[in-house]
Each structure stands twice: as C-alpha cells, then as structure tokens.
Image: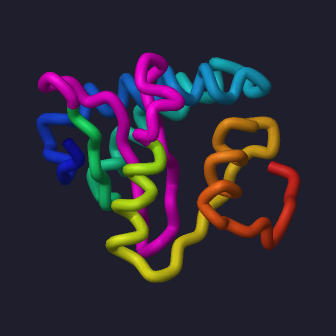
C-alpha cells in the first residue's frame, strides 16, 4: 500500500534511507551517508514523501520536491518486485513533469529510470 508519509514514520524511513544509500552507492564512503544522516532527518519531513507499507512495515519510499524526485528507496527484500515502479507511478500522478539526478554507477536506478522513459539531459561530476 502506498500512502503519505506521517511524522511517526521518520525513524523507519531514515533507517531505510541510510541502509539503501550505503548498499546502492558502494562507490561512496559509508561515512558520507552516516555524516549526512541528521541533516537529511531534519529536512526530510519538509519534502513530499510517499511510503510503500507492507505488514505495517515501511519497505520503500519516494521523496519529491516540486516535481524533482529526490530519491526512491527500496529495501533489500523488495528490490526487483516492481515497488520502485509503483512509487514512480505515484510521482507521475502528482506531476506532469518530473526530473531527478542519479549516480551513473547506480546501475539499477539508471535502468529503472530509462525503462520508464526518463531521458539523460546532462552529465556532471558530483
């Protein structure tokens, strides 16, 4: 089930944010994600967030800011089950135009977005 983020979800969402970033971005130091945990925790509630919940546990979420997809985060056990696509469909319902940035080395994410007709408009060093 996809639903709007509630304040009570914050810790569970942040744990998912951290574990997913560490796993998906093994080319970036773990310390970077841990070091940004509190910053993201402080700003995350201001974004438009939808969570995917199964058996009263948050398994995935998408963060959107005025049509910009800040990220789609899916737990290990729910990877490759269409959850990311469902969250992306939710974003498409809300906005007629979407944009995002993704690390080139995050192959799973790049493949998802290209399958969903996103077009690479710019490459940059981050």
Above or below, 114 relative to 28 = below
In the rendered image, residue 26, in percent from the top left (x then y), is placed at 72, 21
Q: Is residue 28 left or right of residue 4?
A: right
Q: Is residue 29 magenta?
A: no
Q: Quadrant of residue 53?
A: top left
Above or below, 16 relative to 107 = above
Residue shown at the point (80%, 49%) measured from the top left: 126
Q: Quadrant of the N terminus?
A: top left
- Tell me which segment is drawn in magenta: 54-83
Residue shown at the point (67%, 36%) measured from the top left: 108
Instruction: Return the residue nearer the eye: 38 or 110.
Output: 110
Q: Is residue 77 magenta?
A: yes
Instruction: Return the residue nearer the eye: 80 or 26.
Output: 80
In the rendered image, residue 33, in percent from the top left (x then y), is placed at 58, 28
In the rendered image, residue 24, in percent from the top left (x then y), is placed at 64, 27
Residue shown at the point (60%, 22%) measured from the top left: 22
Instruction: Give the image's coloring scheme.
Output: rainbow
Q: Residue furthest bottom?
A: 96
Q: How many marks?
A: 0
In the rendered image, residue 78, in percent from the top left (x then y), is placed at 42, 25
Q: Is residue 80 left or right of residue 57?
A: right
Residue shown at the point (61%, 20%) measured from the top left: 23
Q: Is residue 70 left or right of residue 28?
A: left
């Amino acid at each position: 089930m996809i639903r709007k983020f509630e304040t009570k979800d914050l810790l569970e969402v942040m744990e998912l944010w951290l574990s997913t970033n560490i796993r998906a971005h093994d080319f970036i130091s773990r310390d970077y994600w841990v070091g940004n945990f509190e910053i993201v925790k402080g700003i995350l509630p201001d974004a438009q967030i939808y969570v995917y919940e199964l058996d009263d546990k948050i398994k995935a979420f998408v963060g959107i800011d005025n049509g910009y997809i800040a990220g789609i985060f899916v737990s290990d056990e729910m990877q490759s089950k269409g959850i990311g696509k469902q969250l992306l469909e939710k974003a498409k319902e809300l906005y007629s135009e979407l944009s995002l940035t993704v690390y080139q080395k995050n192959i799973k994410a790049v493949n998802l977005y290209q399958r969903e007709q996103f077009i690479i408009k710019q490459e940059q060093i981050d």
